[in-house]
Amino acid sequence: MKKLSALAIIMIFLISCTSKQGNMTVKGNIKGLKKGTVYLQKVKDTALVIVDSVVIDGNSEFILVDDIISPEVYYLTLDKKSNEHITFFGDKGEITIDSKLEKLVYSAKIKGSKNQTLLEEHNKMIKKFNDKQLDLIKANFEAQRDKDIEMIEDIRKKEKNLVKRKYLYTVNFAVTHAKHEIAPYLALTDLYNANVTLLDTINNSLSKKVKNSKYGLELQKFIDTIKKSEVIK
């Protein structure tokens, strides 16, 4: 009886030390991971901070939690100082992430967030733009080698047009999905050096809920800063 009581006390102590409360739960499995630590990180005040972690010892499944006010981007990594991380849109409720140790980032399958689905859709198209850009870089290298002035000029025009199309795609995507936090997020990450008019277009299309979200407030602040600096100039 005394042994059972002692065991119960130990179990209560362990639960109180390891359990963290939060309105977002990230469950997952990294196949091939036998030992190590899985970190859940996010950006806070421009710094990347660890919000939760779990030690893996034999069982590659994990559960991580955090309190989230509005949807925002999180990072899942096996090394808190590594640049290799799974990027995903967190949200209230349950998020599932399944991956493999050998290809941690590229084999990741993420479910549970509408913003995540939209982010993947956007990134899939952006990859096509980036692939075309790589083709143009290769063509430009060959034109430079052959000293083909006409070809170099033609490639320059194509590159300029491609960048414009890429920007407009992201703007249209953000405006189309203005009821989701992905919209201001893309404005801040993919269009930060775009004309402020484009940023205004996205900002003005946002729903009231999104305007008051983490990225909605950051976008407004960013636009205000740009306009203020233009007035000073």
Image: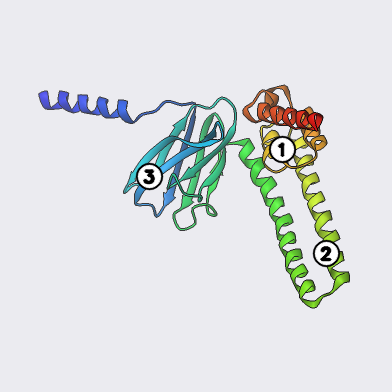
For the point 66% across and 32% down, the residue is 181
The residue that disc 1 covers is 187
| Colouring of the image | rainbow
* Label 2 crowd bin: few (<14), some (14–19), many (20+), radius 10 Å: some
Q: Is residue 142 above or below residue 37?
A: below
Mark 3 or 1, which is nearer the eye?
A: 1
Q: Is the C-beta separation of discs 1 and 2 under 8 Å?
A: no
State the residue at coordinates (61%, 40%): 116
Choose between 76 and 222: the one closer to the eye: 222
Please tell me which of labels 1 and 2 falls first in the chain. Answer: 2
Distance from Cα at disc 3 to Cα at disc 2: 47 Å
- Residue 93 visible somewhere in the drawing: yes
Residue 16, quarter of picture = top left
- Residue under circle 2? 155
Where does the image place residue 184, in percent across and percent down from the top left?
70, 34
Q: Which amino acid type is shown beneath numbered disc 2?
A: Ile
